[in-house]
Structures are given as C-alpha cells and as structure tokens.
Image (cartoon, grey):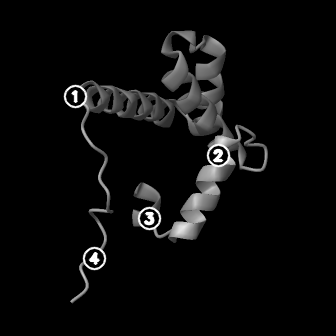
Amino acid sequence: MLLAVAGLKSDEVKALREKLATGDWSSFPLAQRTAFGLAYKLSKDPASLTDADRAALIEVFGRERAVDLIWYVSWCNYMTRVADAFQLPLEKENAFTPVKK
C-alpha cells in the first residue's frame, strides 16, 4: 500500500514485490540492499544483528539514519506481530486512494 501511495502503479508494485521476494537484491543500489538486509535480519532473527551490520548501516546511511532504520524496521515488526496476535484482517483496499467524484 505504501508503494501505491508513493505513486507506483499496481503492475509496478507487483513486479517490485516479486523481485524483492527472490532474495536477490544485487540489481538494487547499495543503500536499498543494505536496508533490505537489515529488514530481513530484524524480521527473521533480530538477536543476530551484529556490530558489523550496524557499522555497514552507519557507513551507508550515517549514524542518525541508521538508528532511524533500526527503530522503524523494529516498530513495523512489532506492529505486524500485534496485528497477527489479534488476527486483525488486512485491508482489502488502499485507504489512501482518492475518492472519485
């Protein structure tokens, strides 16, 4: 939904989602590859985040943005786990789509 809000069309979102799901992020820029790696690691095994992982984030994004990324990815995982625990249904439609008059 956030990709649609950012302006991607549904076919572009689908293509990007499929590309990301392969786990081969080599065609993405370094910053995106680094962020994807962080998100994957924090989602699968957050305790496995190492000093080397944090150093790589800082090198690519700077100290403040690295902290922001760790916080945001962790928060998204937290919210997903809460929604899963309460078995909250996913929204069927993009709540941000402008209403046609």
Q: Earlier in the sequence, mark 1 or mark 2?
A: 2
Locate the C terminus and report the quarter of the image it occupies.
Answer: bottom left
Q: Which residue is mark 3?
A: 4
Q: What residue appears at the point 31 percent right and 46 percent down from the top-left corner? A: 90
Q: What residue appears at the point 27 percent right and 24 percent down from the top-left corner? A: 85
Proximity of marks 4 and 1: CB atoms separated by less than 8 Å: no
Give the image location of residue 47, x and y in percent. 51, 10
Give the image location of residue 48, x and y in percent. 57, 11
- Name the kind of residue labelled 4 in the image: Pro
Q: Which residue is mark 4?
A: 98
In-front residue for pair 61/44: 44
Tell me the distance, in whole angstroms, between the alpha carbons under discs 1 and 2.
27 Å
Give the image location of residue 11, x and y in percent. 58, 68
Q: Residues within 10 Å of mark 3 (few under 14, many from 20)?
A: some
Q: Which type of secondary structure does the marked residue at label 3 adopt? A: helix
Q: Which residue is mark 1?
A: 86
